[in-house]
Image (cartoon, rainbow, N blue to C red):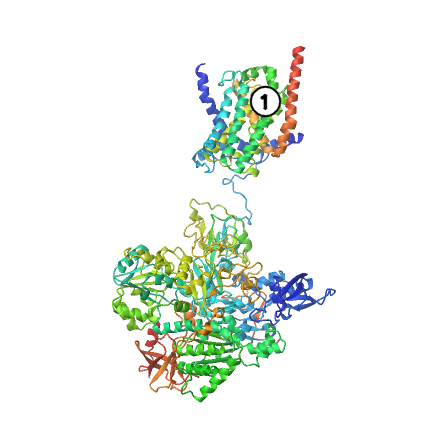
Amino acid sequence: MSHLPLLAIFLIPAIILALATLLTWVERRLLGLWQDRHGPNRVGPGGLFQAVADGIKILFKQDWIPPFADKTVFVLAPSIGMMTVLLSFAAIPFTPLSGIAGTLNIGLLFILGMMGLGVYAVVLAGWASNSKYALLGGMRAAAQMISYEVFMGLSLLGVVMIAGSFNLHDIVTAQTHCWFILPQCLGFFIFLLAGIAETHRLPFDLPEGENELGAGFHTEYSGMKFGMFFIAEYAGIILISSLVTTLYLGGWLGPVLPAVVWFVLKTSGVVIFFILLRAALPRPRYDQLMALGWKILLPLSLLNVTATGTVLMLRAAG
Amino acid sequence: MLNTVRTLFLTFLHAFQARATVQYPEEQPYLPSRYRGRIILSRDPDGMERCVACNLCAVACPVDCISLQKTEENGRWYPEFFRINFSRCIFCGFCEEACPTYAIQLTPDFEMSEYARPNLVYEKEDLLINGTGKYPDYSFYHVAGISIPGKDRGKAERERPPVDLHTLLP
Amino acid sequence: MITFQLDGQSCSTRTDINLLQACLEAGANLPYFCWHPELGSVGACRQCAVKQFSGPEDKTGRIVMACMTPATEGALISIDDAEAKEFREGVIEWMMVNHPHDCPVCPEGGECHLQDMTVMAGHNTRRYRFTKRTHRNQDLGPFIKHEMNRCIACYRCVRFYRDYAGGDDLAVLGAHDNVYFGRAEDGTLENAFSGNLVELCPTGVFTDKPFSETYTRKWDLRGAPSVCVHCAVGCNTFVNAREEKVRRLLNRYNDEVNRYVLCDRGRFGHGFVNAASRLNTPLCLSDEQPTPVPTQAAMAQFARMAASGPIAGIASSRASLETCFSLRSLVDPDLFSTGQTQQEQTCTELAYALLRDHPGAIPTLHEMESADAVLILGEDASATAPRLALAVRQSGRQNAFLAADAAKVPRWMDAAVRTIGSETLSSLFVVSPAPTDLDGIARDAIRAVPDNAARLGFAIWHELDPTAPTVPDLKETEAEQANRIATVLAAAKKPLVVSGMQYGSIALMQAAAGIARALTRNTSEAGLSLVLPDCNSMGLAMMGGAPLETIIARAKAGAIGTLIIIENDLTRRLDPPEIVDLLEAVPNIVLIDHTATPLWQNANLVLPAATFSEDTGTLISQEGRAQRFFPAVFPPAPIQASWRWVQDLARALPSKQGTPASPASTNLSEWKNLDEVIADLGKELPVFAKIINAAPDASYRLNGQKLRSQTYRASGRTVIRSYISVRDQPPPTNSDTPFSSSMEGAYRTDMPAALVPHLHAPAWNSVQALNRFQQEIGGPLRGGEAGIRLFSSATAEGKDSVQPSSAPDIPPPFIPQPDTVLLLPEARLFGGEELSMFSPPLAARAPPPDLRLPTSAALQPRMTLHLKGYGPKTLPVRHLAGLPDGVALCPPHMVAAAFRFPQIVRLTPDPAEGEGEGEGEGEET
């Protein structure tokens, strides 16, 4: 038992990275599926090694830092992005036993904190690139992520109130009888949207809206530094999906099959839903995004907190 | 809101529809005869080169990848060299559009990748085919006014015999 | 100035012009064919129809031909009127009825006036379904290709060829729809200006045959403004090149010089730049064989040579001013030669002095066209300066214009003026030994050997100015002729005297200058023009230097270690024995030239120079106009401008010798570009100070950009050299000019006139686009003047005070001798000039040399000349009517590389009848 966390510290990030890489291929295959295409199917069985090929390619690309960029920050930014996402996984309880710090008593707060730090990666990248598109992308990312972080946290309060704990392990076990998606369907919905916005995935990928900003904050990035942003984004998807699973879908809980399989199945389902969103929905305008956040989601999340609190109070009183 | 859900559902349903992608090269795609692929130079029905080196294809080319030099033999104009740099060509078909003699034509062949760029520079002998291409009957010199061996003055379509200058009759 | 309304717009224009000109000057697009600014209006094509309204209340109007209607004050004109439009569209549709489906195989395509006008008139669909008229073509010689099917019967060709240029072998044949423009039978077009048919013909009937062999569409040609190097007139040209090869020359309009017309020698004589005789690598003499060496080795070789003794330099009258100056800066002042013989140099320097000090006008060619009395004294200008002769030919119409003015016929009404003019006499007098092309329109053509012509000239001078020296032993007929000519000249408002150094006679030029000076007492516009042999003869005369004889003398004295010869074929100037002397006396010879002249095999070092089409330089024409030529071609590496070679030589000199003993103001080895050479030249020789204004310098920018020398739609950029390397190369650059070599750069119709690289304006692809570049039709260009006059009537302050330094020597009358003849040079348009003979079409037009004798001499098929320094030469003999007794003519340089004129030679019957050895030798040397 004492060696297990140590092993997990090395193993879990490695697995996450591998999965994130694999996810790039999965996404393209799925997009193909929903767009009546095949997607990458040439390298390896079913195109499985496409991700490997891409990885090799991106490793061999020229490591280019624009002469006008702020070099230190420019190099630092992608690693911040990568680090915060990977650190967040520490608090995710994949099974009752595995996970690095699944029983961390402030697990959820830790993850929210890491996500908050993740904004720096994007903002610093945009700023250090010293180019107008990157800067605009960075600005958008900052505004978007800070806005959505507010009600992301608020939307989780319902779960925390019901479970009575920030400890993710406890939150999962609190769902033994009923997944929180049922009592907290509004929270679930808000958290899902906020999660998309946090990872700046389509349809909320305005920081890198390619038809307006080139590639947004990572316009000036290439080679493996771009690759780190790229992988971090996919790791972020896995993180948000894991969180959704943990917080609303009962985590590892499930009959017959082993716990880890349940966790993976549920997470995969959420990931696939993320990809379906990308395949189906257009990108909103920036003002629409902000309006949605501040005028709809924030009041709704406050309502959710109030309602949950009221119900809990009434039940406690009753 | 409902629309969004409907969109998601409809998109999801596409997973069960047929693929539009053609699995080239296992499966060869159907290419219509007017497909814009590899450029060729055709010959007229008499088997002579159709290209008259008028330079219109070269000037129409938006990427300036066609170059040629006119030469002349017995009244017929020919390209002395005719060069296309396919590493620049964008297969827009403007050259074919501009060609007044149907000489330059784009064909449904696109399999012309090379490992070395110089191999993509095609000279006249690489371009010239032994056929008429898409226009089997057209022969420019049979409608043009200049004379060539086998077609004297006034022998083109819709031409009168040469004027006899020694008569003043109307 | 008058004002008229064009489609509601108020336009002001000049009086005395027609509506077509007025509309074009107002910037309107009005199609036309038969009208040409130089030929006037005949109203043949009916294409320029416009609607004229009689007043504001007139809504119907009437269709008039703009070219036949004078522009009048307050006229109401409409081009856009629907009826006029329909009329013009109908006219062009009729023209296109018989026009063949030829554009792809027509060399005119892309610069075709007919194409432009068809688009402009709006005709686009062929309705006519019946048969087309066809014609048989003629072989019109090596210059012009004939394709009669394309003719639209605008009559421009015959009007130019017969009326303007005085030719008689091109005519209209046939009748009605069948009219045919050609010769009576196949054969070469004889006129010296036949090449202009290419530009004048609005469609592809007459096309450029040599150009057709390496044909390129206009849009693919890189253009550069240039100056003709084949005579001293200094006509402006466009050089057109592609793939670093000169493809053709076109006329470049200069309102004061050549205007719309270029002679065939200038147009087709550029072949030497592409000839096999070009030198393209440095050569060193090793084992008596010229061997290619790298440039560095050549310079090292020169450094060794320089140690062996003083360096002398021989410049050339066909090299640019900057080249001559660089050589002058390299060598000791007394070891710098102009590369001319004593006789030639005396003549050119005298011509310069006479022109500079002439108190009247030094007329431009355009001014010559309006001279109302002309005396040509002892010069066959139609061969030595053809464009000048054509200007003089136009002056013959002055009396016709006066008659037209009296009859109130506008001068542009060409057919009417010519009809009136057919009854007037010209005031042109030709005095020359041999018949000239201008005799036909001359009031009097007098045959006289040069000495007698000079005597006649002095006699005229004396008639005009009694203080002038009297001519002893003047015959009565001569006195009468002198009196007749003097009377006409004295009555003229704008008289002109033309002479030259064709016969190497100082007296002729002195007499001509004397007459012109005497005439200035009547009118300040009395003009003097002296014809010089080479494109930069005047520049050299102004620069000065020792004649060749001095160099030979010093070489014989052992005072020359190395002799640098630049762009000069000495065998054309020195007799064989003199050449041998020179070669023996000078240990080292460095030859800088673009063409392999006979001495190249004897030179210890040969350096390949750039031609006029490959570098920049300034030439000074015989009227003192400094004009700059620009490169259209970027030659491969070792080839560079001669002055850069001289600079390289200066840098290669051992440092102890340092800068040579030339004045400190020249930094020969420091020059970075041509502008610095010109600046130094102006400082060193103030007479050239103004040449800096001949054209804008290399730092000139238009709209902040260089000027483009390719058209904006030049094709093949990414492929043209991909057979060498598929990688794109940056376009070549040149630090001497403000031109970019590519299609990138500025181009405007009001760009400086000296820098216009080609003519194009929206909707005007042919050379007729020129009307968009002119301030007014036939007037100066919108970009100002091209070139600058170094001396002219405008600068004649205080010229009156300058009197001829000494009384001229009046030569004794010529008396024919029984056993010898006076051998005179027969100036030929083709065959006399050096460089143009490397051009294949021109060489084809040069007839084999023969000997012309007066009809009084017994005619034998072949006779032998006994030339000094050459031995006997046998030539076929022909009679020439009108040639004075005791005189023989033969083409110079074709008979012997160099012989001095005039020469008294012995003429004997051919000993061995038949073998043509002499002829062959003459051409080989």
Q: Is residue C428 above or below residue A242?
A: below
Residues C523 and A314: in front is C523
Residue C408 in view: yes
Circle 1 residues within 10 Å: few <14, some 14–19, many ≥20: some
Looking at the rendered image, the quarter that the C terminus of chain C falls into is bottom left
| Residue at the spot of label 1 | A153
Q: Which quadrant of the figure has residue C662? A: bottom left
Residue C146 in view: no
Chain of residue at mark 1: A
Q: Is residue A9 above or below residue C300?
A: above
Looking at the rendered image, the quarter that the N terminus of chain C falls into is bottom right
Outermost residue to the bottom: C476
Residues C297 and C462: in front is C462
Outermost residue to the top: A318
Total count of labels: 1
* Element class at badge 1: helix
Residues C703 and C598: in front is C703
Q: Is residue C601 above or below residue B59?
A: below
Residues B2 and C399: in front is C399
- Image spot of residue C406 (x, y percent): 62, 78
- Image spot of residue C574 (x, y percent): 32, 72
Looking at numbered disc 1 in the image, what kind of residue is underneath it? Gly
- Image spot of residue A265 (x, y percent): 55, 23
Q: Residue at x 54, y 75 (%)?
A: C163
- Image spot of residue C804 (x, y percent): 41, 76
